[in-house]
Amino acid sequence: MGLLNLFNKRQLLKVIEWEDNSKNTLVYRYPLTDRDEIMNSSTLVVRPSQVALFIHKGEIADIFAPGTYKLATENIPIITRLFALPTGGNSPIKAEIYYVNTKQFTANKWGTQNPIMMRDADFGNVRLRGYGIYSFKVDDAKLFMKEMFGTNQIYTLNDVTEYLKPLIIEGVTDAIAESKISALDLAANYKEFGEKVTECAQAQFAKVGLKITNCVIENLSLPEEVEKALDERTKLGVLEDKMGTYTQMKAANAMEDAAKNTSGGNLAGLGIGLGAGGAIGNMFANNLTTTNVPKVENQSKPTAAGKKCSNCGHAMHAGAKFCPECGAKQEAKFCSNCGHKLQENAKFCPECGNKVE
């Protein structure tokens, strides 16, 4: 009866392991009660992407990488020294066991709560806002336990990301300042920004035993007024600036606004719109007539120098037989080329040598 009561008071742990079914647990404290005893012959199982730590009185003792271990004095030297465990036997081990998850935690979101100031060559001082994702993992379990975890029962992803987000923002700020890339070229350099942020933030992550594996910049946005200025510049870049493109666009917008206002009480605005429309119409009309329409040479023959009607003296074309003014028949014969008066039987003009038809 006494042996049975003693056995009920103490539970001997044969196999120690942690099956992680969660997606956000970084550190798990193996549950030990006052009735549990870790014997010097128990089996310790450490799965892939795990590290097991034995802690005695708040101090980290032995650390176990992934694998299966038969606890003995050979593989728990620090615990053996602290308790002076004899070689062999089933002497109980007094220690706390913590499992640290060393897998990579991906798709952690970051975003700017306050805008980041940036000095731009085109727009001066502008404010940027951004967001993206980053990934990290535990690189030094012992340092991570000392600096971040302590002795909590469970340490989750939410507990650590609140600390890491400001480090990412700091890295983004440093990357923008060091790159000196203009606001117009930000979108074309997201990949380079992410690599630079990873490099800048790694030193801060390493101080707590973590490692940032990558950082993705999904968006860096400018203030609304700067984006509107960029849109205006894009519109002007599409058009050819030959006839005051900016003035035409503004005048057209004013005319459109005036046309939308059909109220009879705002005749002044309507007049301005009509005036602007008339001015633009005249401008385009003049441009079309002076630029796009080719000049047509006058195909009519010039009047012959010196030839006049024998009756009224009206100027006539060379070779005309009747006066266009009075209709009188012209008795004299003139050269059809230069209008010189010819003899009746002349075959060639004595003035210009043209053959008389």
Image (cartoon, rainbow, N blue to C red):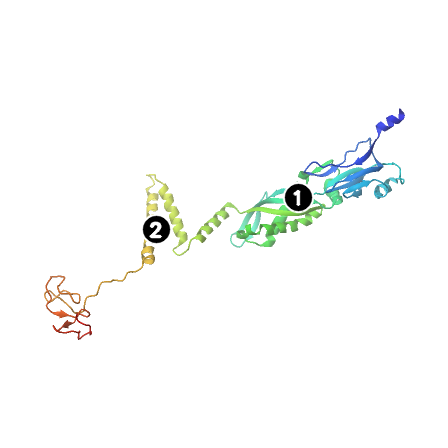
Is 276 placed left or right of 175 in the picture? left
Q: Residues within 10 Å of mark 2 (few under 14, many from 20)?
A: some
Q: Which quadrant holds the N terminus?
A: top right
At horizontal 32% and vertical 42% (from top left) the residue drawn is 267
* Figure check: 243 above or below 320: above
Q: Which mark is residue 87?
A: none
* Figure check: 113 above or below 185: above
Type of amino acid at the residue the image marks with label 1: Leu
Q: Which mark is residue 164?
A: 1
Is 320 placed left or right of 5 in the picture? left
Q: Position of residue 269 (x, y in %)?
A: 35, 43
Q: Position of residue 95 (x, y in %)?
A: 81, 37
Q: Identify which residue, 330 or 2, lies in the foreground.
A: 330
Q: Position of residue 94 (x, y in %)?
A: 83, 36
At horizontal 33% and vertical 55% (from top left) the residue drawn is 288
Q: Identify which residue, 17 or 281, lies in the foreground.
A: 17
Q: Position of residue 304 (x, y in %)?
A: 18, 68
Whichever of labels 1 and 2 marks the residue nearer the N terminus, that label is: 1
Q: Which quadrant holds the C terminus?
A: bottom left
Mark 1–mark 2 CB contact (< 8 Å)? no
Q: Residue furthest top?
A: 1
Type of amino acid at the residue the image marks with label 2: Ile
The answer to whether one can see residue 259 in this image is yes
Q: Which mark is residue 280?
A: 2
At horizontal 82% and vertical 34% (from top left) the residue drawn is 13
Label 2: state its secondary structure. helix
